[in-house]
Amino acid sequence: MGSSRKNNFVMQASILAIAGIVSRIIGLLYRGPLHAVIGDVGLGFYQSAYAFYTIILLISSYSIPSAISKIIAQKLALKEYKNAHRLFRGAMLYVMAIGALFSVVLYLGAEIFVEKDAIWVLRAFAPTIFLYGILGVLRGYFQAHGSMIQTSVSQIVEQIVNAVVSIGGAYLLIKHLMGTMTIPEDEAGKVQRGIFGAVGSALGTGAGVLVALLFMLVIYGLNRNFFRKRRRQDMSLNEDSYMEIFKVITFTVVPFILSTAVYNLSGSINTKIYTGIYKEWKRLSALEVQTAWGIFSGQALTIANIPIAFASAMSAAMIPSISALIVAEKVEEAKRKIAMATRVTMVVAIPCAVGMLFLAEPLIYLLFQDTAESLVVAGKLLGVLTPSVIFYALSTLNSAILQGINQMKKPIYNAAIALVAQTICVGLLLRYTTLGIYGVAIANTVYSGIMAWMNQHATKRAIGYRQELLKTFAIPLCASGIMGIVVLGGFKVLQFGLRSMRIATILAVCLGIVVYGMALLLLKGVSEEEILQMPKGEQLARFLKRLKLLKGLSH
């Protein structure tokens, strides 16, 4: 089992997940300094523009890595290496054309998507659309070969450059155009300063993608001889025409794009309703609305999205793996992989959600430069969002499974139904209650819950498997509850003794990881075989055996 274990999808997903979590942690760490430079107002403008940039990105190229990895993996499973490479080249031409088109659409149509104050922020994102498509094809090509390392490193590189340029760009633009970093007293001055800071930060996103693209091009160049050698060894007589290739790409990519776009459209709709319609309903100023939106979207939602990186990574690893098994008609093996992927995802997502619930305010304080009032609001918002961590993780994974087994329309229908329900929910809460920004958080959680149930149900019906419940949901939830109680008590003791909320939070999180791991092992929620499938799993298993924590578990 030595070599097979090294190449299994859980291992590859773990590598990609670690990179995704590291990238998000970097993203969180730079949000503090960025927030200090541009403030809640600038963060609000940035998040408003970013929501619509994300939609254009989703429509044009965000799903490219998953879609390309799926169709190329199918060719590789049949050992059609020439056709796999022709698909790669066809995909490059496709994303260049689509990327150029949507970059122009985003730039020229910015005033349609966002309020006038955020127009130039959105336009700063436009070139990134073109670059991301090319980057996505390269990532998808390597993922189809079962290797997530290239994508993982490029994600970390992208985020580091993004962090440095975002903070530096925001600082330089404000300093140069305002003449000072001092926050003006008047509202118009605060808004103008926020716009300049948000534009500078938006430039960081493009810089990160550009450097990641250059990195992937270098990696591809280093592996070019290997790919060329495999094509020379391909003796298959079947050669797909470029007409067939573009047809396959279109019919594969479009459902992926529609599914992902509808799935993520909730954020843009919430942005439009809260920063536009709600502002008019309640006669609020741009400063009030953007400040609240910055706290919700730039702080609480950003932290809540971190654990979902693991589900996204598992999904990226699942799609080529499941697609190859379906092509090879190995349905039972596909079911086993689906069951294991769901278990592993829940083992990670559930404790993250519980930990955020118990340490909501301390986590916000650890990462952001908040006033006492903003800290309370952000903490409460994060508390409301915690169930969505589990729901989004589950729905993201099942959406990928449905795409992998050629049920690509199902996630689109499910997302559309959930989107309608969420839009009605947020509209009613904002119009007829005094919940304000908390209404958006509640609607977001409702949306993710509906998506989780519908995608899970669709997956069960499509492939006919039943998910094991005890070790997948009950034991992780029980272990997380124990962890949450210990962590909360430990945090209070540490804060009292150390007189530092930040240090107490870091130590409490470390304590939580240890307590959860021990509780999970003692409750027999994870087996030795599953531990062996993790990165450095053999060393971890030996260590746990020495501590007598693996005794009595299945092998």
Image (cartoon, rainbow, N blue to C red):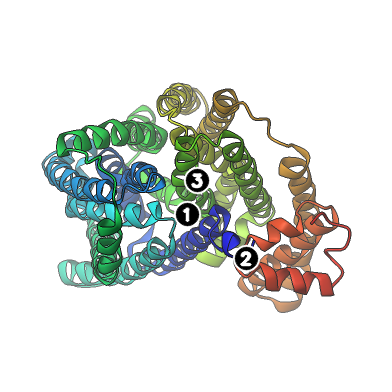
**Residue linked to disc 1:** 299
| Structural crowding at the residue carrying mark 1, measured as other residues with C-alpha within 10 Å and reported as few (<14), some (14–19) or many (≥20) | many
| Structural crowding at the residue carrying mark 2, measured as other residues with C-alpha within 10 Å and reported as few (<14), some (14–19) or many (≥20) | few
Q: Does 22 appear above or below 332?
A: below
Q: CA distance from mark 2 to mark 1?
A: 43 Å
**Residue linked to disc 2:** 2
**Residue at image location 43% in from the left, 22% down from the top:** 413
Q: Earlier in the sequence, mark 1 or mark 3?
A: 1
Q: Quadrant of residue 472?
A: top right
Residue 292 in the image, given as x and y percentages of width and height? 43, 46
Q: Is residue 227 visible?
A: yes
Identified by mark 2, the residue type is Gly
* Secondary-structure class at tag 1: helix
Q: CA distance from mark 2 to mark 3?
A: 21 Å
Identified by mark 1, the residue type is Gln
Q: Quarter of the image for the C terminus: give it.
A: bottom right
Task: Judge left or right: residue 325 versus residue 486.
Answer: left
**Residue linked to disc 3:** 318
Q: CA distance from mark 1 to mark 3?
A: 30 Å
Task: Judge left or right: residue 206 versus residue 20.
Answer: left
Q: Which of pointers 1 and 3 indicates the residue nearer the eye?
A: 3
* Secondary-structure class at tag 2: helix
Residue 132 in the image, given as x and y percentages of width and height? 25, 53
Q: Which of pointers 2 and 3 indicates the residue nearer the eye?
A: 2
Identified by mark 3, the residue type is Met
Q: Quadrant of residue 98?
A: top left
